[in-house]
Image: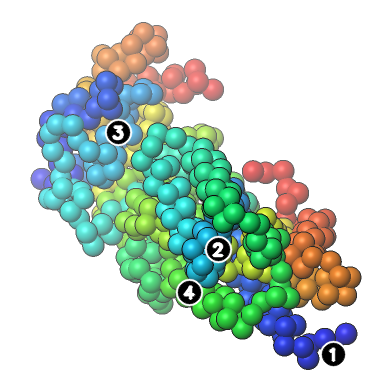
């Protein structure tokens, strides 16, 4: 059993009347590659925001590297985060390399200039996502998938131990999604702990080693083969999953759902 | 033409134009990229209240405008963060309220002050040595703050949410940006005038935006365009006997349309 990276204990998050996450207890260990899946509005995003301390728990507790997330201070650099909706102006006059370098700004400290080591880390991060050649490109002159990788590189620039991505494949095609998950798999093989929120059940099952199914509550959590069962999917997706969920192999469930979407 | 530079008032006008052409262009880069043009106009109109207050109390109008504009900038930032309203609504409220205060102050003076209209429309040729020192001091403050927080201001302009998530004090930096903008407005009003100062902030940066895809290059180009507009505007206004502020703004506008037509980058379909 690895060291606990994220510990949620009876976590509940409420936005006024709406209960987004209810009584979730979940432990993410070092070296896991966890997918948080579930339908829209199932509290996936709220769950990762709570992990990061970006929303306050209404009840229960969150620990990140053994501490409340807001108390991480300089250790914040151990976490890389790629948010769901990024309001980036594609016409902004900025180059890919400078966007990646921004990932290190907080670490560099106020007023200080990024040094040689920071630039080296940004260069390396860009190399890790396979975009070394595009450092000088303006941010808008990229495909959707490339832009997504730049944001992953920005999250990697602090050389984090934990990488959290919220719906990184929204709005990109299946091939790009597959490529991104292969990339995340290599990070995982290099020892990084990866948490990815996705509604793309299909791709997820083939790459991750843990799945957490959310539908406000944690419906199931475990190995993909344990979790991706028709009854669990039905609990999350209702009738829709029952329609596609004939057969025992998760792959079959998955593939049919994908082809049904296309 | 150059012999006019032997006059003291013309030398001061030239130095003031260069200072203003530089500072407004730099602040304008953030204004254009973050979509803050309306705040710029709002703060500029707030300076009317500040200048009127200065005349009423008998203090230097530039100093009273500094206080007034900073208070307005902070008021806009605070209101949009704490009241459940959009920022443009907050600006709309402050915009009108500060103008109304200015009109009230003028009424209390009991007489129309000719100098006040110099502030409304700008009068670069009447810049005194004292005005110039004040302008230079404000310019140094503005440029130092931008120099110190260059990378932070870039981050909050490009991606404010991620800047905050990554641990930078994004709200404080935003308030700092608005404060610097307020100082820029104040240091420019003597030359360009309250009504036109937001144009000098927006137009050089908007022109530079047409011509490059690099942030630092955009800033450098904006400074060049700001200075060309200010100096050419000054000389033209002297030659043609037209209002200096208006001539500078129209020169900048001409440069903007030329840049928009020459722009190599804007016309791409992808967004």
> Is any part of residue A200 visible from this angle?
yes
Closer-to-camera residue (B264/B132): B132
> Is any part of residue A132 visible from this angle?
no
Kindly give the residue lying farthest to the front in the view shown: B110
Q: Give the residue at mark 1.
A: B3
Q: Give the residue at mark 2.
A: B55
Coordinates of residue B39 in the picture (x, y in percent)? 55, 50
Q: Chain of mark 2?
A: B
Q: Is disc 2 in the same subunit as disc 1?
A: yes
Q: Is disc 4 in the same subunit as disc 2?
A: yes
The colour scheme is rainbow
Nearest to the eye among marks 3 and 4: give it: 4
Q: Chain of mark 1?
A: B
Q: Is residue A206 above or below residue B211?
A: above
Mark 3 in CB contact with mark 1 (< 8 angstroms): no
Mark 2 in CB contact with mark 1 (< 8 angstroms): no
Nearest to the eye among marks 4 and 2: give it: 2
State the SS at label 3: helix
What residue is shown at x 34% (from left), y 50% (from top)?
B165
Q: Give the residue at mark 3.
A: A46
Q: Chain of mark 4?
A: B
Coordinates of residue A53 in the picture (x, y in percent)? 24, 44
- The mark that comes first in sequence, 2 or 1, is 1
Q: Alpha-carbon neighbours of circle 1 within 10 Å: few (<14), some, or many (≥20)?
A: few
State the SS at label 1: helix
């Amino acid at each position: 059993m690895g060291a606990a990276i994220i510990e949620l204990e009876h976590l509940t998050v409420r936005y006024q009347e709406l209960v987004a996450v209810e009584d979730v207890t979940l432990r993410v260990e070092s070296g896991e590659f966890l997918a948080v899946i579930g339908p829209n509005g199932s509290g996936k995003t709220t769950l990762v925001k709570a992990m990061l301390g970006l929303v306050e728990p209404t009840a229960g507790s969150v620990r990140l590297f053994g501490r409340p997330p807001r108390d991480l201070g300089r250790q914040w650099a151990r976490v890389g985060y790629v948010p769901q909706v990024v309001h980036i102006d594609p016409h902004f006059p900025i180059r890919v390399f400078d966007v990646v370098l921004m990932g290190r700004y907080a670490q560099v400290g106020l007023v200080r200039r990024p040094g040689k080591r920071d630039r080296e880390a940004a260069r390396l991060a860009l190399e890790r996502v396979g975009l070394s050649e595009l450092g000088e490109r303006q941010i808008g002159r990229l495909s959707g998938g490339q832009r997504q990788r730049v944001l992953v590189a920005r999250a990697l620039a602090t050389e984090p131990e934990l990488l959290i991505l919220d719906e990184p494949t929204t709005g990109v095609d299946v091939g790009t999604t597959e490529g991104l998950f292969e990339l995340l798999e290599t990070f995982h093989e290099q020892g990084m702990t990866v948490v990815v929120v996705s509604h793309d059940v299909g791709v997820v099952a083939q790459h991750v080693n843990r799945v957490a199914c959310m539908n406000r509550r944690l419906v199931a959590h475990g190995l993909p083969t344990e979790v991706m069962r028709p009854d669990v999917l039905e609990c999350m997706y209702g009738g829709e999953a029952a329609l596609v969920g004939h057969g025992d192999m998760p792959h079959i469930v998955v593939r049919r759902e994908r082809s049904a979407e296309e | 033409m150059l012999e006019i530079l032997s006059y003291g008032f013309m030398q001061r006008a030239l130095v003031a134009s260069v200072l203003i052409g530089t500072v407004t262009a730099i602040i304008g880069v953030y204004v254009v990229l973050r979509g803050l043009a309306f705040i710029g106009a709002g703060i500029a109109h707030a300076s009317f209240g500040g200048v009127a207050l200065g005349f009423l109390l008998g203090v230097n109008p530039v100093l009273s405008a500094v206080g007034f504009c900073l208070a307005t900038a902070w008021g806009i930032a605070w209101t949009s963060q704490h009241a459940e309203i959009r920022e443009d609504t907050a600006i709309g409220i402050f915009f009108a309220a500060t103008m109304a205060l200015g009109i009230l102050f003028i009424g209390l003076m009991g007489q129309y002050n000719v100098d006040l209209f110099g502030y409304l429309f700008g009068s670069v040729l009447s810049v005194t040595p004292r005005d110039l020192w004040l302008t230079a001091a404000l310019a140094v403050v503005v440029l130092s703050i931008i120099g110190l927080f260059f990378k932070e201001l870039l981050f909050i302009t490009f991606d404010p949410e991620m800047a905050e998530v990554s641990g930078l004090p994004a709200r404080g930096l935003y308030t700092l940006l608005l404060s610097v903008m307020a100082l820029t407005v104040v240091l420019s009003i003597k030359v360009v005038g309250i009504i036109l100062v937001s144009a000098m902030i927006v137009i050089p940066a908007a022109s530079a935006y047409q011509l490059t895809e690099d942030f630092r290059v955009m800033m450098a180009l904006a400074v060049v365009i700001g200075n060309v507009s200010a100096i050419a505007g000054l000389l033209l206004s002297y030659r043609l006997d037209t209002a200096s502020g208006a001539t500078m703004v129209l020169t900048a506008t001409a440069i903007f349309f030329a840049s928009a037509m020459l722009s190599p980058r804007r016309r791409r379909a992808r967004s």
